Image: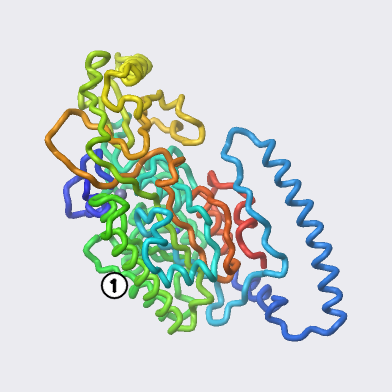
Amino acid sequence: MGGASLSILSPSKPIPDPDGEDLQNPSEALLQAGTKNPISSAKPPTNAILFTFILLTTSVAIAASMAFAFLFFSSSSSSQSPPPSIPSIPLHLATRPLTRLNKPVVILISSDGFRFGYQFKTPTPNIARLIANGTEAETGLIPVFPTLTFPNHYSIATGLYTPFHGIINNRFVDPASGEVFTMRSHEPKWWLGEPIWVTVANHGLRAATYFWPGSEVKKGNWSCPSNFCQNYNNSVPFEERVDTILQYFDLPISEIPVFMTLYFEDPDYQGHQVGPDDPAITEAVGRIDRMIGRLIQGLEKRGMFEDVTIMLLGDHGMVGTCDKKLIFLEDLAPWIKLPSDWVMTITPVLSIRPPSGVSPSHVVDKMNEGLSSGKVGNGKNLRVFLKEDLPERLHYKASNRIPPIIGLLEEGFKVEQTRSNEQECGGAHGYDNAFFSMRSIFIAHGPQFARGRKVPSFENVEIYNLVTSILKIKGAPTNGTASFPNSILLQS
Ligand SMILES: [Zn+2]
């Protein structure tokens, strides 16, 4: 279990246990907008100031009425997740002009398992610089359920909830074919939806991926080209990853990829081993900050830092787990026997597929009867559902890859099949995405992000549309909110 996403992503290591854990021509508009930026235009004449004042006053009134209309319509919307209510951007702020580049470039960085709040564990001057001069989700980025590495990275990349992009767990069985998906499966049939690097390639633009779940899968015009698509290898030093990204900025400007990913296994790796409240986490967070510093300094040296959009985020959080918070499936035997081959994944996402002939609803009823009897240790901390009865907000039913029975655990609890003598205290994730501990960070710095702005938390399915908006390309349909990019990005 402690192997985390690092061991799971590794092509050279064995398949993990199921309980293991394991991102044309936009430049013209942008440049034009930049030259008209009222901040940068020097000393306008008096009548221009007056005109600007009238324009701003009128715009404020229009914006206020639009905001009201937005709130009105959003409050009357359906059972879908309500669009996040983002405070409007001051109207004097517009997209900042590019100086060195002639096109928007986005670097999407994932720090695996970077739980929201880790940035306060230790001085993180480089992350703090991005926050101070950029836009931050004030209380973190909300992962999708299940809060696991592969489902979330692919939701970030596609803007889709897991049933729609197909990666419903780090490991699952296709019930139709019996084939097993693992974190080393690169066949396109598993990976549904359109990840951002495919969208970029389909627009005739260049993307570069330095690790990201799904990036090695050939789809659309994306062929995972060897010079711009790194095959996963957890032994590559973080410094080398950053330096490779920096080298792309030494290419002729027309050849610089417009979208790049950068992935770090930390601090997820440490989080699994020791839990979120250990000096090893503090150390790992400090190291991630130094990598961000290395990237910033490299871009500054090339005169491109202010032109590039950096989005720093994580896939999920982390919570401490100890063996005193265990629920054993064997304890349910008086109500129902659960053979291990019915159990597709055990913790933190318990998923069960009984054989044909055994009614899933019967299994659910018997399991919940036992769990609520008071006779099963920690039983009240596990609730079992038919997947169609799961809360809508989890968006976890519309795929036959999802087993018919899903158990939701209270924060920090674990399920095991049988008792063992193993004793451990570590960390886990995968729990309900409503738990604050499962949240990660969202920090964005670049020409289209206001400086020092805080926005409310939002779900990571909004990221895809943010990237396509910045790149000014038409994206594929997503589960994101159509109005979201306009609410968070500076307007050109
Ligand atoms: Zn993990």
Q: Please indicate whether residue 100 sits to the left or right of residue 333 in the image.
A: right
Q: Residue at x 44, y 53 (%)?
A: 157
- Which quarter of the figure is the N terminus placed in? top left
- Asked if 346 appears above or below 54 in the picture, the reply is above
Q: Residue at x 25, y 54 (%)?
A: 6
- Asked if 459 appears above or below 387 in the picture, the reply is below
Percent from the top left, x then y, of residue 95? 63, 70
- Which quarter of the figure is the C terminus placed in? bottom right
Percent from the top left, x then y, of residue 117? 42, 56
Along the line of sight, the residue nearer the viewer: 342 or 331? 331
- Asked if 399 appears above or below 270 in the picture, the reply is above
Q: Residues within 10 Å of mark 1 (few under 14, many from 20)?
A: few
Along the line of sight, the residue nearer the viewer: 134 or 465? 134
| Callout 1 amino acid | Glu
Q: Quadrant of residue 345?
A: top left
Q: Quadrant of residue 298?
A: bottom left
Instruction: State the SS at label 1.
Output: helix
Q: Please indicate whether residue 301 sits to the left or right of residue 75 in the image.
A: left
Percent from the top left, x then y, of residue 301? 43, 84
